[in-house]
């Protein structure tokens, strides 16, 4: 019940594009108050504060933490400074909610989590698509045993280099994403492997990755050096997976297909559908006639669910972030477990390190920090 919830004072560090998404969700979240925002460029902080009616803005993190006594700080900066900012926030008594990727390397991600645990605080990472309504329905189906045991997983994410974020990436060779060890892949592939890893047994998986550049190089700078197509094959115990990050296929898709011992389920994160396929029970001729009709009925049912969510104002873009923050803030209030196990976050970071080692086989450059 709302009246039993302690209102949490929230702050945001880093007032770039993604910070708007955080502010928009926190502003309407019950039991939360967006108290202050901060950016080393004070004008950006002021502009964000004005857009969302935030009462205070700062150009210095230490000053904000000292004055505002925040319960939770959202860190939406590039990952190279996540560890240092987490240390500051935890020292000031704040829990932290971090944008992905968590850190430049898996060891650095572990150090960050160790800082949080040692300080008696909680953290989580913004794996928001995994808390969107389709992802939550998939988790229920998995927990109910409807799929049986996972046998194989296919996760696919498309990326639009001509979109708003893509244009920034392609027009600025000094953009922070180009300085990441894994460049574009590093900034995006969390959303592939945070879906696959929870379906794997807790063993060290085989990871085989290759990548290439499909577009023509025309600028003669860091943007030309960036690879834009990634394929990864994984196997852990009796489960295998194939992950793709694709910049050129159309339409731009965001899907996961899980082949189980009882049924196969495809989750479409863009179209917000979750559709299962099971073995046919009918004779061969009828068995080939029935499946399209069955699938049409299942997609119609999904459309009806989506219409209902739209009418209940539950269809906004960051619905998953709202759910994730509700769970995270509740875990802070109750002292319960955070919504994403730390071990799972670290397993994703480890897989990412191994992929980057294979597709960009160079040591981390000093200027990436």
Image: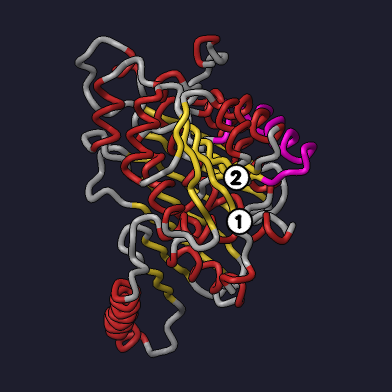
Q: Residues within 10 Å of mark 2 (few under 14, many from 20)?
A: many
Magenta-colored span: 102-122
Marked residue nearer the N-terminal end (1 or 2): 2
288 or 82: nearer the viewer: 82
Q: Quadrant of residue 66?
A: top right
Circles 1 and 2, Cβ within 8 Å, touching? The answer is: yes
- The residue located at (54%, 16%) in the rendering is 369
**Residue identifier under label 1:** 329
Q: Is residue 150 visible?
A: yes
Helix, strand or loop at mark 1: helix
* Residue 80 located left or right of residue 57: right
Secondary structure that dominates the magenta span: helix
Q: Quadrant of residue 301?
A: bottom left
Q: Quadrant of residue 260?
A: bottom right
Across and down, in percent, residue 235 comes to 60, 47
Q: Is residue 110 visible?
A: no
- The residue located at (46%, 54%) in the rendering is 321
- The residue located at (35%, 46%) in the rendering is 52
Asked if the magenta segment contains residue 107, the reply would be: yes
Helix, strand or loop at mark 2: strand
Across and down, in percent, residue 264 comes to 47, 69
**Residue identifier under label 2:** 72
């Amino acid at each position: 019940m709302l009246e039993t919830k302690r209102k949490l004072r929230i702050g945001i560090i880093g007032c770039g594009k993604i910070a708007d998404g955080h502010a928009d969700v926190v502003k309407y979240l019950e039991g939360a108050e967006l108290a202050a925002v901060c950016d080393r460029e004070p004008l950006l902080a002021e502009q964000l504060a004005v857009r969302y009616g935030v009462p205070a803005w700062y150009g210095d993190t230490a000053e904000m933490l000292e004055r505002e006594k925040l319960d939770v700080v959202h860190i939406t900066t590039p990952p190279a400074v996540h560890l240092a900012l987490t240390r500051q926030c935890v020292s000031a008594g704040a829990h932290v909610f971090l944008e992905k990727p968590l850190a430049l390397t898996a060891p650095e991600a572990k150090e960050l989590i160790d800082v949080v645990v040692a300080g008696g605080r909680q953290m989580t990472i913004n794996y928001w698509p995994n808390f969107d309504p389709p992802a939550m329905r998939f988790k229920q189906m998995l927990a109910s045993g409807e799929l049986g045991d996972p046998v194989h997983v296919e996760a696919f994410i498309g990326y639009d280099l001509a979109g708003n974020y893509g244009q920034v990436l392609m027009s600025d060779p000094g953009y922070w994403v180009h300085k990441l060890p894994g460049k574009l892949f590093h900034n995006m592939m969390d959303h592939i492997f945070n879906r696959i890893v929870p379906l794997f047994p807790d063993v060290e998986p085989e990871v085989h990755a290759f990548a290439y550049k499909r577009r023509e190089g025309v600028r003669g700078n860091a943007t030309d050096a960036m690879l834009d197509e990634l394929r990864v094959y994984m196997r852990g115990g009796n489960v295998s997976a194939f992950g793709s990050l694709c910049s050129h296929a159309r339409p731009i898709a965001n899907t996961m297909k899980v082949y189980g011992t009882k049924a196969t389920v495809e989750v479409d994160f863009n179209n917000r559908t979750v559709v299962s396929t099971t073995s046919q029970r009918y004779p061969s001729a009828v068995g080939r006639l029935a499946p399209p009709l069955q699938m049409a009925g299942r997609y119609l049912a999904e459309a009806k669910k989506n219409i209902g969510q739209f009418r209940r104002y539950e269809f906004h873009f960051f619905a998953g972030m709202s759910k994730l923050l509700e769970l995270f803030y509740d875990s802070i209030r109750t002292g319960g477990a955070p919504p994403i196990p730390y071990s799972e976050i670290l397993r994703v970071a480890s897989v990412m390190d191994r992929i980057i080692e294979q597709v960009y086989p160079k040591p981390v450059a000093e200027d990436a920090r």
